[in-house]
Image (spheres, rainbow, N blue to C red):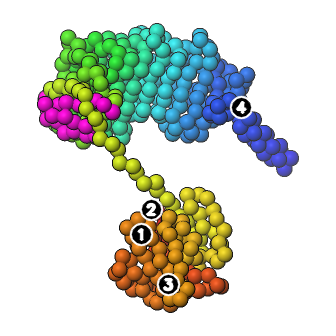
């Protein structure tokens, strides 16, 4: 018994210890790692592995600070939730790999301001997840990056941004798969926004005769906003072009041009090939729909000009082939003001009404009368943002919101909306000197949605 109590106390102390250092000065969840250490993840007593830090994050966004050199050759932490940022705790922090090793990151990851030294023929790979690479301008990855992943895998989609650093070879068709049954069910997207890439291959990496490409169920998107890409090609040892069920979208924004070596697969793309050249002044971005692109101006006084037609911010449908986009003087239309959503909750027997999380006391709680939820008249109308007028002579309440006028009379089994009567199962009535009205009829008269949670006996009104 004593041992059990002691173990429980130690476990509680460990949790409290983790909680005490896991939050940094800006309230961000953070842990520290130094290869081979045996600490608890604090700045002074770091974890020995990145795997421990990811586990400690518990599926939440957070930052892992790395001391010194850390070998990610065999890093294959189980899949995680949340965005994990891996950065250097000091300027000499560096991620390394052994020769021919492959580091696989099974969750969303951001690399920020940390050195990298890849061993000969080694590679860094996501697993059909989100990967943001901002290692630093002077960091050079001398070998491979496989997107959307390595080996035989199936993922929902893949998204990668290369924001800084130099990359020898990037494969947008993955690597070392042995069946076209592997790949991504949705879109594969690579955005180059500041990085330098020597060779960007739209095919899959391979070194064996049984290596194939991957299947992409959606679109394959390559977007170059800034930086340098020296060649875009499908050249490989074996025929490993991806099978793309959607479109192949290659977009050069901000006046970027195609490199001298520029080839892409054609026979294996079902949805057509779209090559877009957009001058400075805005961006064209892909969507999940074939042939549909998002138009984003850098200024309210610039609009896109495509095939002689002005195109405003929003989406545009283009034909396969090459498209030139200019940005010319013009006024973007004003965006419509979206009405702020309101959520109102009342619980049977509870004398309060909650509007967008803010509770207010009621004299009379919501209650069920003849199988209908009845609520205090003035409270519900005011929560809906409607006016309330009471005619004592006729016992009639009139409420106005926008172009909708609602009238109810005590004891009368009908509601009048803009002059039209509608029958009620239960009329408005006075209970404990307060007027109660049927909540569903009132809310729906003003165009609101009404939901009911039976276990908690709670009605939710959304407008």
CB of mark 2 within 8 Å of CB of mark 1?
Answer: yes
Q: Which of 130 and 255 is in front in this view?
A: 255
| Earlier residue among tags 3 and 4 | 4
CB of mark 2 within 8 Å of CB of mark 3?
Answer: no
Q: Nearer the viewer, residue 184 or 457?
A: 457
**SS of the residue at dot 4?**
helix
| Earlier residue among tags 2 and 1 | 1
Question: Which residues fall within the magenta stretch?
Answer: 300-321
Say which mark, if any, is on residue 396: 3
Left or right? Give the position of 43 relative to 459. right
Q: Which residue position holds label 4?
A: 21
Q: Which of 61 and 310 is in front in this view?
A: 310
Q: Which residue position holds label 1?
A: 446
Left or right? Give the position of 355 relative to 36. left
Residue at 53%, 28% (x, y): give it: 85
Which part of the image, by quadrant, shows the C terminus? bottom left
Q: Which quadrant holds residue 329? A: top left
Q: How far apart are marks 4 and 1 (CA)?
A: 50 Å
**SS of the residue at dot 1?**
loop
Foreground: disc 3 or disc 1: 3
Q: Which residue position holds label 2?
A: 463
Q: Residue 440, position in %: x, y?
A: 46, 75
Q: Is residue 137 above or below residue 125?
A: above
């Amino acid at each position: 018994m004593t041992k059990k109590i002691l173990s429980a106390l130690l476990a509680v102390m460990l949790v409290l210890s983790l909680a005490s250092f896991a939050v940094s000065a800006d309230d961000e969840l953070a842990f520290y790692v130094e290869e081979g250490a045996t600490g608890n993840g604090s700045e002074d007593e770091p974890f020995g592995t990145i795997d421990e830090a990811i586990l400690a994050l518990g599926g939440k966004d957070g930052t892992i600070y790395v001391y010194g050199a850390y070998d990610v050759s065999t890093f294959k932490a189980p899949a995680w939730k949340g965005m994990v940022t891996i950065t250097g705790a000091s300027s000499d922090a560096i991620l390394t790999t052994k020769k021919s090793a492959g580091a696989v990151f099974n969750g969303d990851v951001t690399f920020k301001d940390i050195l990298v030294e890849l061993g000969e023929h080694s590679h860094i790979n996501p697993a059909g997840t989100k990967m943001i690479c901002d290692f630093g301008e002077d960091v050079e990855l001398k070998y491979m990056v496989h997107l959307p992943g390595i080996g035989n895998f199936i993922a929902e989609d893949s998204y990668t941004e290369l924001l800084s650093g130099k990359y020898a070879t990037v494969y947008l068709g993955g690597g070392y798969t042995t069946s076209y049954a592997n790949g991504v069910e949705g879109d594969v997207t690579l955005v180059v926004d500041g990085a330098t890439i020597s060779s960007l291959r739209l095919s899959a990496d391979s070194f064996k005769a049984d290596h194939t490409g991957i299947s992409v169920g959606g679109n394959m998107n390559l977007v170059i906003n800034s930086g340098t890409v020296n060649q875009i090609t499908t050249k490989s040892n074996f025929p490993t072009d991806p099978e793309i069920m959607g479109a192949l979208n290659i977009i050069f924004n901000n006046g970027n041009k195609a490199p001298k070596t520029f080839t892409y697969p054609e026979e294996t793309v079902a949805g057509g090939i779209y090559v877009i050249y957009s001058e400075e002044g805005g961006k064209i971005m892909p969507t999940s729909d074939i042939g549909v692109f998002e138009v984003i101006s850098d200024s309210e006084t610039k609009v896109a000009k495509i095939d002689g037609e002005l195109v405003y911010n929003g989406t545009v449908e283009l034909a396969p082939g090459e498209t030139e986009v200019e940005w010319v003087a013009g006024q973007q239309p004003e965006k419509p003001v979206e009405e702020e959503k309101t959520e109102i909750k009342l619980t049977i027997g509870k004398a309060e009404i909650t509007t967008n999380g803010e509770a207010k006391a009621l004299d009379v709680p919501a209650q069920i009368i003849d199988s209908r939820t009845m609520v205090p008249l003035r409270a519900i109308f005011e929560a809906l943002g409607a006016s309330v007028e009471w005619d004592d002579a006729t016992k009639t309440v009139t409420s106005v919101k926008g172009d909708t006028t609602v009238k109810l009379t005590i004891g009368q089994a009908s509601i009048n909306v803009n002059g039209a009567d509608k029958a009620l199962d239960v009329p408005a009535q006075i209970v404990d000197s307060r007027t109660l009205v049927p909540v569903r009829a009132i809310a729906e008269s003003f165009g609101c949605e009404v939901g009911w949670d039976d276990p908690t006996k709670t009605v939710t009104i959304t407008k």
